[in-house]
Amino acid sequence: MRKSAYVGMIFLFFFLLAAAGTFFLVVMDIGGTAVDMPARGYLEVPLAGTVSEVAAPDSLSSLLLGAKPLAMYDLWMNLRMATVDGRIQAVLLRLGLLQCDWAKANEMREAILDFRRSGKKVYAVIEEAPDFDMEYFVATACDRIILHPLGWLGINGIGGDVPFLKGALDKLGVRAEFEHVEEYKPAATMYTEKGFTPAHREEMGSYYGDLFAQYVATAAKARGKTEAEFRALIDRGFFQGEQAKAAGLVDDCLYEDEVQALLRRDGRTISPVGFEDYTRVKPSSLGLENGVHAVALIYAVGTIMTGESLPQIMGGATVARWIRTARTDPLVKAIVLRIDSPGGSSVGSDVIWREVALARKVKPVIVSMSDVAGSGGYWIAMSATKIVAEPQTLTGSIGVLAGKFSIDGLMAKLGVTADRLVFGEKADIFSPFRPFTADERKILKNEILWTYEQFLTRAAEGRGLTRDQVDAAGRGRIWTGRQAKDLKLVDELGGLTMALGLAKKEAGIDADEDVRLDIWPRKRTFWQSLFGRPGLAVELKSAAGRDRLLGTARLMNQTRIWAVMPFWLIPQ
């Protein structure tokens, strides 16, 4: 057979495969699939990998994104349904390494504890986990923690490295030239310093120190230990099989067949129910979301930019439009704005802030903060009726920065030259081929000081504080949600359940009424996703952390004044 024929057959095979996949997606959109539920089952939850806020709004996005990340909304709703579903007898969590931060982990714990109040059991199964502090923190909410008999459990604390790139940039001949407000706004110090500034070290130590304190206190109490005893176990660090059981860190060391026997301890058959299958069960079939009132649940996820949303980008115009639609809908009695964002464009943030302020005048707007509501992510929250944060939420970073990278040194090394041609003395102020002049740096500083004052003014008005009170809590500094509550930057500590309860209370809806949730971004059919404009894409966080480090640099190429938070620790 000729080579061209082989190529044709291969092309035809992949074409038919793609066509079959497309047909499957269309069928799913049109008719869905039935859920085959056993009379007695346990919900099996694969709690590992990337954790997003909400699932991709359409099946095409799911196909293009590859492996589907666990969505916090699905976990929250599935556990709510399982609580009242008589067919679900227990929950089995298969814990692996999570790609999220501590606020999401804490919300997982809250959802597990809410489920346990039904009297049903939750079991955490761990096979091997050499670096497992955040995941173990989640496991301590369960009735029993089960480790594989040869499993290695590592609970060795919180720590890692903060990279600084100035030395590398110096060798390349690149200068990072930035002005910021103020000393705690170190989003650019990775490019301008070779190590921590005193203020940067102070805020990072305070933030991660409080995370560690919360972890120790919570896990120690859950495992019946004093904080000193649990800290001693962390200092020891690593435990294998029976060592972990003897230390009181796990309850059992079991193989899979023994886990199944534990689930069947009363001798009756119990079958697994897949997590993805259970997401297709309608809450209304279990008596949930059958109320006459609706609450809009709007997801504001990702780095903020002006315009429409794009993959991993929160468009100010898109989210503002969703809020405006909910504000003008008479059936929607309150709005819950769910935020997971490190900030971004100050203008894009202000576009959303304005719609939140307008909505608050006609109906309650409750903000629910997830892992991050920093800088612009806090800007969009501060005019809400109430703000709810997890105790671990990265909150605040009220500050502004602006600048550029000058690459004239690098270009000289490469033999690249540039001649200046401008019409207007400041026309090339942001040119990468020359540094700022002293006068230009002064202008830049004045510009961001003005933007910072707008930030302070809006925060003071929204939070009922003075300008000086906000400035004392601001200056670019990050806080945990627990610290932010003491500073009155947030009102309550909790997750989506608390935010929904506050929304009902503020709207005058009975606490026992299970309201309907009007969720944005909307679910989209296959054809809408194929031919319509893109909706908000779920932000996928990189396990390696490099996307976090490079995200600021990508943003700096697209806008001039930023309200973006500092970079993060890379755990080791």
Image (cartoon, rainbow, N blue to C red):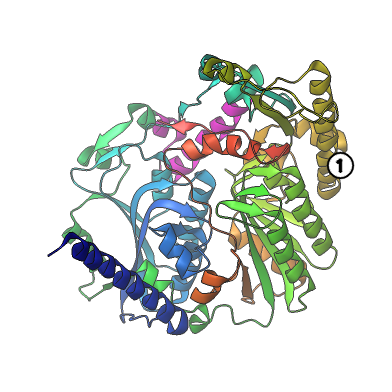
Give 114 or 285, whichever is nearer the viewer.
285
Residue 330 picture quarter: bottom right
Q: Which quadrant of the figure contains the N terminus?
A: bottom left
Please rate how many residues cluster around mark 1, counting C-alpha atoms within 10 Å: few if below 14, some from 14 to 19, many from 20: some
Check the image and name the residue furthest to the left.
1
Which three-letter amino acid code belongs to the residue tagged 1?
Thr
Q: Which residue does the image show at 41% across and 60% down from the upper left?
A: 68
Is residue 206 found inside the magenta-colored segment of the image? yes
Residue 560: x, y in percent? 73, 37
Q: Which residue does the image show at 69% across and 21% down from the upper left?
A: 434
Range of the magenta residues?
Answer: 202-231
Is residue 455 found inside the magenta-colored segment of the image? no
Give 30 or 571, whichever is nearer the viewer.
30
- Up-down relation of residue 484 to residue 146 (above or below): above
Magenta stretch prevailing secondary structure: helix
Residue 186: x, y in percent? 65, 27
Regarding residue 215, the answer to whether it shows in the image is: yes
Residue 40 picture quarter: bottom left
Q: Which quadrant of the figure contains the C terminus?
A: top left
Give 179 or 530, whichever is nearer the viewer.
530
The residue tagged 1 is: 457
- Up-down relation of residue 154 to residue 28 (above or below): above
* Horizontal side of residue 208 vs 388, given as left or right: left
* Horizontal side of residue 23 vs 518, given as left or right: left
Residue 478: x, y in percent? 65, 35
